[in-house]
Image (cartoon, rainbow, N blue to C red):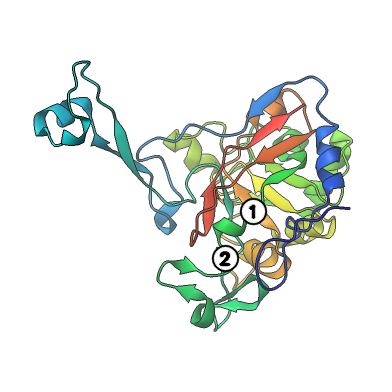
């Protein structure tokens, strides 16, 4: 059985250790050739999660008019066809829009450690973490399982800051007649992305997510990643006293389970698609603590 074993020093994540059989199991779910885009459009000044991350900005760098006026592209030589181009600078946190957190995203303890025993003192350089950064996130190709919590509760979207418990997850899986298997990715639906970016809708439904108990339950099922349709997979403020991010600590630091956020599940939920081939390909960016992704579900 083939194994992906090219991450880096130290313990490897569950996703890195997935088997080729997990991918074949995902591909076997493709019977109709229907593809669902699980990413929302990104745009300048799009909402970001509070002060934690830089909002996305797109700035024009070269334009046809600017090239003509500045007349600084002499390398083109004679240009009788008026050839020009447009390019831009994109300034953003990698945690903007649909993205996957690297295992170096969250730290804890007096030594500011992250997955695999890495610490800020010995593994953090001027240009980002030296271990478990975004360049070491493997491609995500596995069976996806949608866990639709609003459908379970008979509502369109969870109220703001609502905590999803392990009992909720179990009940939703039973309602859908779906079973999590080792190697799966669990996508938690809260409904909070449905009305995004309407400010009133966001205020009424923001930052609902799984609590620590639900994270432990999902991890114990052997999932390699957990995603959500919100900007944070866990409910905030935290339900765990004294710990502002128990789910991030449990999954990223303790278990090596990746977190995906802002994954748009509205269309597959409307069509009652609970199991599918899930594909998301991270960018190999050295020193980044996440990667923007274009996640898709195929059935």
Which residue occupies the foreground of this view, 97 or 209?
A: 97
Q: Residue at x 43, y 37 (%)?
A: 199
Q: Position of residue 118 (x, y in %)?
A: 60, 76
Q: Position of residue 254 (x, y in %)?
A: 70, 70
Q: Is residue 85 above or below residue 58?
A: above
Q: Position of residue 35 (x, y in %)?
A: 68, 24
Give me the disc on residue 19. none
Quadrant housing residue 70: top left
Q: Can the viewer see residue 178?
A: yes
Q: Residue at x 29, y 30 (%)?
A: 86
| Label 2: element kind | loop
Does residue 164 appear left or right of residue 179 in this picture? Answer: left
Name the residue beneath numbered marker 2: 104
Quadrant housing residue 63: top left
Give the mark nearer the N terminus: 2 vs 1: 2
Q: Residue at x 61, y 63 (%)?
A: 103
Q: Residue at x 56, y 49 (%)?
A: 207
Quadrant housing residue 102: bottom right
Which residue occupies the foreground of this view, 161 or 111?
A: 111
Does residue 197 appear left or right of residue 19 in this picture? Answer: left
Image quarter hosting the C terminus: top right
Q: Position of residue 270 (x, y in %)?
A: 70, 24
| Dot 1 alpha-carbon crowd within 10 angstroms: few under 14, some 14 to 19, many 20 or more | many
Residue at the extreme front: 77
Name the residue beneath numbered marker 1: 259
Q: Is residue 108 above or below residue 293?
A: below
Which residue occupies the foreground of this view, 56 or 64?
A: 64
């Amino acid at each position: 059985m083939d194994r992906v074993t090219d991450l880096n020093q130290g313990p490897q994540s569950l996703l890195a250790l997935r088997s080729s059989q997990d991918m074949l199991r995902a591909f076997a779910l493709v019977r109709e050739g229907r593809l669902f885009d699980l990413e929302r459009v990104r745009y300048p000044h799009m909402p970001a999660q509070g002060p934690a991350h830089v909002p996305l900005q797109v700035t024009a760098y070269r334009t046809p008019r600017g090239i003509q006026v500045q007349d600084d592209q002499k390398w083109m030589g004679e240009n009788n066809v008026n050839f020009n181009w447009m390019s831009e600078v994109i300034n953003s946190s990698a945690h903007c829009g649909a993205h996957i957190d690297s295992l170096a995203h969250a730290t804890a303890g007096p030594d500011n450690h992250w997955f695999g025993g890495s610490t800020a003192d010995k593994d953090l350089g001027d240009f980002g973490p030296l271990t478990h950064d975004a360049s070491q996130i493997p491609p995500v190709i596995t069976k996806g399982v949608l866990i639709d919590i609003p459908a379970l509760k008979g509502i369109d979207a969870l109220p703001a800051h609502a905590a999803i418990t392990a009992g909720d997850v179990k009940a939703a899986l039973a309602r859908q007649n779906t079973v999590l298997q080792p190697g799966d990715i669990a996508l938690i639906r809260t409904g909070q992305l449905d009305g995004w970016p309407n400010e009133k809708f966001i205020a009424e439904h923001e930052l609902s997510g799984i609590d620590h108990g639900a994270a432990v339950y999902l991890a114990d099922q052997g999932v390699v990643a957990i995603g959500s349709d919100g900007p944070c997979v866990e409910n905030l403020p935290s339900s765990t006293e004294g710990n502002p991010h128990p789910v991030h600590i449990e999954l990223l630091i303790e278990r090596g389970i990746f977190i995906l956020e802002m994954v748009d599940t509205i269309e597959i939920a409307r069509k009652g698609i609970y199991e599918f081939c899930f594909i998301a390909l991270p960018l190999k960016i050295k020193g980044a603590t996440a990667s923007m992704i274009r996640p898709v579900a195929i059935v």
